[in-house]
Amino acid sequence: MSAISKTSIPVQPPGPNSKRILTNFNEYLSTPRRTKALAVIVLLLSFVTELMPPILHGRLSAPPEIGDPFDYDAIAFSLWNGNGFSIDWDNPKVKTPYRENNASGEYDGVLGATGAAITSFRPPLFPIILAGTYKIFGRQFWPIRVINCTCIALSVVLGFLLVARYFGSIPALGCAALLLTSPEFRLYGRQMLTESSACFLIMLFAWSLILATDDRDPLWFLAAGGFFALAILDRTMFALWTPVLLVFLFVLLRITLGAWFSRENLKAILLIFLPVACLAGPWMIRNCLLFKKFQPLGTQGAIELPSGYSDKAYQDQGRWYECAPGGWYGEGNEQKWAALGSAAGLKWIKSNLSKLPILAFFKVRSEFWNWDIIDQMIRAFGLLGLMIWLNSNSKCALVIIGMVIASVMAVALTWSIGGRFLIPIYPLLMASSAVGLWTFLVVYIEVGTERVALLRQFQRYTSDK
């Protein structure tokens, strides 16, 4: 059996007269050569299935979708034209693609936007990548959609390889299938949003942590910190993961190195957070200097704090709602609305301390809970898969659990968007579900087959007697 699948079956092997159908076929497919071939197939299939819908519906080169992509496009346009990280809705050229594609009136809102100012409302990585595509291809929207589809495809492959590393190729294919048949996961990859790049960066972060604890190579700790820093620059919300990740990093290092606070432990933590300070630090310092106050993560959290903490937020059970005022883009408006939003949110928090635990529960339930019976079965298999993973490789399981709990805490502290914040950890969730489903099938089919064979042997023995 190959190293890839050496822990693939967490049950006792059947007896010599039974058929190990799934186990044998999994071992056959889990050689390094076949696993690599399957990974290439999964990559190509993921890319094609992600890219085809926008091509078939004529959306590949269309202007950005309504909502957040407008800001990313406007910031990228300013960067492309050498005007820094800013938004300028007063420049008619910014609105040209929207004006030319507004026959149905879907872009009336953005065409009516006004105001121009330096901003920190959006994190920088995605607008910088988008500006890079404008620099190379002109102001075309198909390159960023191709990049997003590529990120989703690579995320699926990384999920496939993670499961294949510990359980073999069949459950790994199950992980890929769960991802490629998930409407939520595939939806965001086709849009000009940060979900795709965030998912790819979190998978690289998870892989780096796993390899770092397996190999104890300082370069993997540095890589993990670099990917985490890029994830923060892609989606500011990941900064809220830091306290939870610190706890799980100490637990991981305790298992790996055998001590809680050794020199090696502290060195590993330093190696992870050094790239975070070097890559994300300048952006945080820039934000503080820009507004002359301690606001390292920008203004989005402050402006939209009432979305997570207000009477309406409590009434809507923590679901996000649009509380940022229209037309706030002008000079000085962003700072003003950040101060007003922050003051309103903090005032509600101080006046409703007893409601905070219930509100946090509402947010997490809204983000994670789906009444669809299939989704609930998949998540039940995910819990089983995590238990199996803890038994077979506790370090890898702790990485997954740590990121899930970090995501839960970030949602509890902010707001829910009906599952959208789960997209970056979807491959990890589906990897656990695939392992649980695989275990269930092996127990049901192979152990059941063994019991039937033993019963028949016993019946023949008693009839002979």
Image (cartoon, helix red, strand yellow):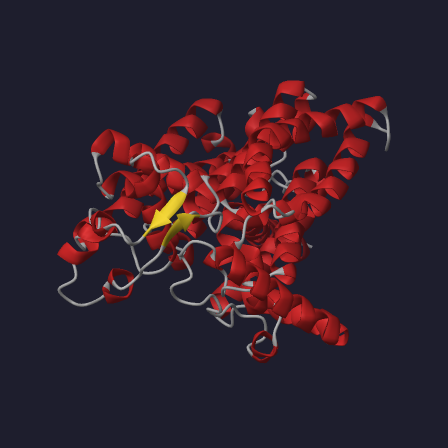
Q: Is residue 178 left or right of residue 187?
A: right
* Relative side of 253 to 125, left or right: right
Instruction: Compare residues 65 and 197 and report the one nearer the observer.
Output: 65
- Whether residue 205 sits left or right of residue 351 in the image: it is left
**Residue 346 % position (x, y):** 67, 66
Whether residue 438 is visible here, answered yes or no, is no
Q: How many marks?
A: 0
- The residue lying at 67 percent from left, 19 percent from top is 218
For the C terminus, the image quarter is bottom right
- Give the residue at x 22% y 40%: 139
Q: Quadrant of the N terminus?
A: top right
Q: Considering only vertical position in the picture, is 71 above or below 285?
A: below
Residue 311 in the image: above or below residue 234: below
The location of residue 429, given as percent across then percent down, is 55, 50
Q: Looking at the image, which residue is at 62% across and 70% down? A: 344
Question: Is 187 left, or right, of 425 in this rendering?
Answer: left
Q: Nearer the viewer, residue 320 or 123?
A: 123
**Place of residue 281 in the rendered image (x, y in percent of width and height, measured from the top left):** 60, 34
Q: Residue at x 58, y 56 (%)?
A: 381
- Residue 299 position within the rendered picture, expressed as x and y whole percent measured from the top left: 54, 53
Residue 463 occupies quadrant: bottom right
Is residue 330 among the parts visible in the rendering?
Answer: yes
Relative to residue 341, is residue 264 depicted above or below?
A: above
